[in-house]
Amino acid sequence: MNNIRINKKFLLPENLKFSLSLFKKPFCSKEKKKFKRYETVIFKNKYFTKKFTNLKKNKKILIISGPARNGNHILMSTLDGHPQIPYIPGEDVLLREFFSKAKDNEQKLLSKLRKLKNVDFITNMSGRYFNKWLKIENLKKSKKKIKIWSGLQKINKVSPVDYQEHLPNLDYQGYYQFLKKQLIEIKKSKDFLNFFLIYLQALNKLTQNKKKIKKIKYEYIYANSGLRRELFYLLNRSKNIICIAPIRKFESFYFSYAKSRYKTNKIKKFILNDLWQHWKHKTIDYLLLKKKYPKQVIIVKFEDLIRNHKNTSKKLCKNLKIKYSNIMEKSTFIGKKVVGNSSFKKDKKYIGKFYNANLNNKFPKKLLPKEYFEILKLVNKVAI
């Protein structure tokens, strides 16, 4: 362990104490070369620059998006059965991929959108480069054993399976046919929100007739991890978009991400440096989002979600302005009990439960820099 340390170039200078005011721009505004597609887009076309004016109070959008391996799927399964929120069909990559295509070539993207002959260009963004929802339907038909879920997906890969060894029952035809009927509207859409609302309606079709919703609070729900640039864009354009962002301590995050990304639970120098940047950059960006949009960003501590789940769920409901429901105590996905999305495979005794087994991994605190504890202190301060 003596030779394992976080590289100094990834740390604040020793004479500087951590402060959020040191970061004038989010990290997502200046990404490394290999991540340029995911960098903040400086839009030029009015399709993107117009303010959202057609999102009414009763059409609120709820987005679940914290950093990867920070508890997004725990939040999804916590809210799954709530009577005032629609079912969520799973994580969807369209929002990130749409922005990435705009980053590549904004005019080319809009030109392609105007000339669509079918909706495959849209549906194939749900899994980044493949149709996630069709893939799930085909996997169910094949009855193949599920070996990989998103907790185990490789670098820059998207698994169609959200929860361990579980495929949901989705109405794929309802989703696809709705988009086909909306093809002309998609081509004529005057701004991004108009297009995005059509797609959110399509996602609702995937789980239609699965839940009767009374006194609905959020018309739409969307989930995908790490949507920092997308959230800076969306939250700036409407107060009716709310984001829940789970944040996890680095000590357990390291083992979870090292297991999924590098297939190891050992502490190694190059992995430590990679994952430290990942944790630091994204955590600070979500703190900046919270600072800029305090009423629209709800930060939840991962550890509270699994150690004090009931009380944390009640706080979450209070912040979302919905009533607490006992159904939130069960880990479900479209009404079915699930094991979870851990990078470490669990046996059947964990079905329907929220568990904290992975927090028992011991990460040597001496390997962590002072600024980590200062960042964590701020997370604790602003979290519910």
Image (cartoon, rainbow, N blue to C red):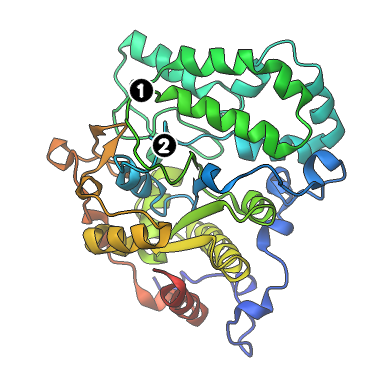
Which amino acid does the dot numbered 2 rest on?
Ser
> Total of numbered circles in the picture?
2
Return the residue nearer the eye: 116 or 137: 116
The dot on residue 209 is 1
Residue at the image position 33 percent from the left and 48 percent from the top: 74
Q: Quadrant of the N terminus?
A: bottom left
Q: Position of residue 149 (x, y in %)?
A: 37, 33
Return the residue nearer the eye: 62 or 214: 214
Question: Is residue 247 visible to the viewer in this orientation of the structure?
Answer: no
Residue topped by disc 2: 150
Q: Position of residue 353 (x, y in %)?
A: 19, 46
141 relative to 344, above or below: above
In the image: residue 254, left or right of residue 145: right
Q: Position of residue 25 (x, y in %)?
A: 72, 67
Which corner quadrant of the image does residue 211 belong to? top left
| Mark 2 touches mark 1? (CB < 8 Å) | no
Return the residue nearer the eye: 13 or 205: 205
Residue at the image position 79 percent from the left and 29 percent from the top: 109
